[in-house]
Amino acid sequence: MNHIFNKVELDLATEIINIGLAKAGDSLSFFTREKVLIRSKDLVIYNSYEKELFTKSSAPITILSTQIRGGMNGYCYLIFNEEEVNQLQQISFPDSILNNPEQLKEMSKGMLMEADNIITAAVVTQFSNLFKIDMHGYVPEYFSGNNKEANSYIRKHADEGNYILHFNTTLFSGARNISPEFLWCLDETFVQAVKKFVKEDKNLIKLQELI
C-alpha cells in the first residue's frame, strides 16, 4: 500500500506527525492533570478507493473531523470506539462529573472536540512550518454512529481527496493506553511536499534537530 512513498519519505512523514503529536500530548496534559504521551504507528498512505477506511467496528464509533484549509486541503478524522471515549472521560473529569450522566454527556462532547482541535492543530502546524505551506484547521465537527454510518460520513470527503494517510496512535496517560485511529484525507500537495522536502539535505538536518 505504500507504493506512493519510498521508505525515506514514509519515515519522514511519520517523524513529522510524531513531532506534532508530542506537542499535542503536552497540551492535553491540561485536561488529564498528568503527563500525556502520544505516538503514531503503522503509518500507511494510499488512494482513497483502495481499502476500508478504518478498523474499529463496535458501535458507537465516535469521529471528530476537521477540515484542512489553505495551501494544503483535506480533512482530518480522529476515530474512537466507546471504550476509548470512556477512558478519556475517566482521565479528564472529576468524580462529580463522572457520576452525573447528563452533565457527563454534555461535557464529554466538548472535551473530545477540544482534544481533536489540539491534536490536529499541532500536526498541521508542523506540516505548515516544515513544508512552508500556509494551512490551518477549521472548526471540529462531532459524529457518532455505527460502522456503516461512520464509513459513509467519512466517504463524503475521502473521495474528494487524492490520498488517505492512515495511522494508529497510542495515548499514554498514567496507567491508561488509549488507541484512536487517524485518517487524513489530503490532496496531491501533501505528497509533493514530502518528496520535495526529502530532496534537500538541509531539511533533513532541520527535522533531526526537532526530534
Image (cartoon, rainbow, N blue to C red):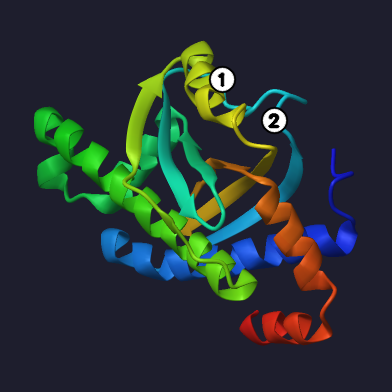
Labelled disc at residue 29: none
Residue mark closest to the camera, 2 vs 1 = 2
Q: Residue at x 37, y 23 (%)?
A: 144
- The x, y position of residue 187, in whole percent, is 64, 45
Extreme residue toward the front, this view: 71
Q: Quadrant of the N terminus?
A: top right
Question: From mark 2 to mark 1, how far is it between C-alphas?
Answer: 19 Å
Q: What residue sits right under mark 1 in the picture?
A: 57
Residue closer to the observer: 25 or 160: 160
**Vertical position of residue 108 compared to residue 18: above or below:** above
Q: Residue at x 50, y 54 (%)?
A: 171
Labelled disc at residue 48: 2
Q: Amino acid at mark 1?
A: Ser
Q: Quadrant of the C terminus?
A: bottom right
Looking at the rendering, which quadrant does residue 142 occupy? top left
Q: Amino acid at mark 2?
A: Ser
Q: Secondary structure at mark 2?
A: loop
**Vertical position of residue 39 compared to residue 158: above or below:** below
- The x, y position of residue 7, in whole percent, is 88, 59
